[in-house]
């Protein structure tokens, strides 16, 4: 029994290192942002730190721009990328964007339906339309590049970005260049990604199916098990939610590869991101079905903390893993 305990104890170290690697990889991704009610200049979506890399996902209606606003100092870099989805039904979608701000020398044809603040200049860039899509390994996802802008702010002040189109379609506006995630952003990012997958045209059922199936399997094991304790039940359900995260990453990878080519390195990166939650789920399952000693409980709490940080288990999984570490294991569930 001591040998088994030691094996379980030492398994957590390589998994923790993989989780740190997972955090390093995902730090190269954009922070998802789902704007609402920003179809007027006065209600522009505020971007607190325009140097930090944000990816706003929205839906454009004809001649109804959506606005974003941020403050930058003179000489600071402004980086913008306009993307569109790879939904075949939107192949004719040609979104454009305009950067409006103090001291900007106007260039390009700014549509009349875009509100230009008084005294501001505007750099208008039209979308090039779908060419070859690209694969993004961290979501994962697939996109078309439509337009880009990179300038140094000519003056300090508030700048606005307008995304617009003469036809309906889904766009993504990437603002900033410094890729990083805050603590709370890491925790809620998986929930935001559900909206991103919906933005891609997937149904909510399709997006949630990997977790639904995984949770159902875990519940079935709990119901049919001979020792149905609170410790075991919570631990098993948490484990399968972690495995569901891996299944979700793999299913999104397949969905994206249908629409965009990927290099071997990009696919390997996505596979690593899928591997870590799966390994943590397998270890959590072993711990939950074994002896509920202090070591096992401590390891479940550690796994719950790690999975919370890497966004595995849709928040519920980490909560169940941490709860299992303190729940009783002697009384059988009815």
Image (cartoon, grey):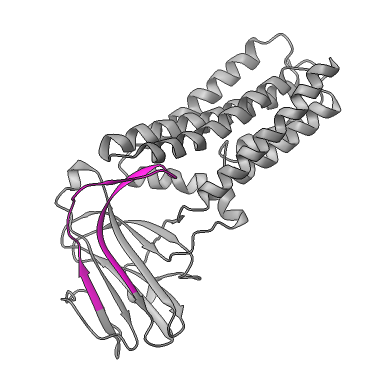
Q: Residue sitting at 38 percent across and 35 percent down? A: 253
* Number of marks in picture: 0
The boundaries of the magenta stretch are: 123-150
Q: Indicate whether 102 appears above or below 132.
A: below
* Main secondary structure type of the part rendered in magenta: strand
Q: Residue sitting at 19 percent across and 76 percent down? A: 110
**On the image, which quarter does residue 89 sit in?**
top left
Q: Is residue 34 visible?
A: yes
**On the image, which quarter does residue 176 sit in?**
bottom left
Q: Residue sitting at 55 percent across and 25 percent down? A: 215
Looking at the picture, tell me which residue is in the foreground, 265 or 285: 265
Q: Indicate whether 29 appears above or below 277.
A: below
Residue 20 drawn at (x, y percent): 62, 44
- Whether the magenta-drawn stretch holds residue 145 is answered as yes
Q: Residue sitting at 26 percent across and 55 percent down? A: 145
Q: Quadrant of the N terminus?
A: top right
Q: Indicate whether 92 appears above or below 73.
A: above
In the shown orientation, is residue 17 left or right of residue 96?
Answer: right
Residue 263 drawn at (x, y percent): 34, 39
Q: Indicate whether 114 appears above or below 195.
A: below
In the shown orientation, is residue 169 left or right of residue 138?
Answer: left
In the shown orientation, is residue 179 left or right of residue 284?
Answer: left
Looking at the image, the residue that sits furthest to the bottom is: 119
- Whether the magenta-drawn stretch holds residue 214 is answered as no
Q: Quadrant of the C terminus?
A: top right
**On the image, which quarter does residue 87 sit in?**
top left
Residue 234 drawn at (x, y percent): 69, 27
Looking at the picture, tell me which residue is in the foreground, 1 or 201: 1
Residue 133 drawn at (x, y percent): 25, 46
Q: Is residue 327 visible?
A: no
């Amino acid at each position: 029994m001591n040998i088994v305990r030691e094996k379980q104890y030492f398994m957590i170290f390589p998994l923790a290192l993989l989780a740190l690697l997972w955090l390093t990889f995902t730090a190269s991704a954009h922070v998802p942002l789902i704007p609402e009610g920003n179809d007027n200049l006065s209600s522009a979506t505020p971007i607190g730190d325009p140097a930090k890399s944000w990816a706003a996902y929205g839906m454009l209606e004809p001649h109804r721009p959506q606005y974003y606003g941020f403050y930058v100092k003179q000489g600071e870099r402004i980086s913008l990328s306009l993307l569109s989805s790879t939904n075949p039904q939107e192949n004719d979608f040609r979104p454009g964007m305009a950067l409006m701000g103090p001291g900007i020398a106007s260039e390009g044809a700014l549509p009349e339906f875009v509100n230009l603040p008084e005294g501001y200049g505007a750099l208008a860039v039209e979308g090039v339309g779908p060419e070859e899509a690209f694969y993004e390994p961290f979501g994962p996802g697939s996109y078309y590049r439509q337009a880009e802008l990179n300038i140094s702010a000519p003056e300090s002040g508030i700048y606005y970005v307008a995304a617009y189109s003469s036809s309906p379609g889904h766009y993504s506006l990437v603002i900033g260049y410094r890729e990083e995630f805050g603590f709370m952003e890491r925790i809620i990012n998986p929930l935001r990604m559900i909206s991103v997958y919906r933005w891609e045209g997937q149904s909510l059922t399709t997006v949630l199916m990997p977790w639904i199936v995984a949770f159902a399997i875990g519940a079935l094991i709990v119901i049919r098990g001979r020792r149905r304790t609170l410790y075991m039940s919570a631990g098993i359900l948490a484990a399968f939610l972690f495995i569901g995260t891996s299944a979700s990453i793999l299913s999104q990878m397949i969905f994206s590869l249908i629409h965009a080519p990927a290099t071997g390195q990009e696919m390997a990166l996505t596979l690593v991101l899928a591997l870590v939650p799966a390994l943590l789920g397998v270890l959590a399952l072993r711990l939950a079905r074994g002896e509920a000693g202090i070591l096992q409980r401590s390891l479940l709490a550690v796994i719950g903390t790690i999975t919370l940080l890497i966004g595995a288990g849709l928040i519920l999984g980490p909560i169940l893993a941490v709860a299992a570490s303190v729940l009783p294991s002697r009384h059988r569930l009815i």
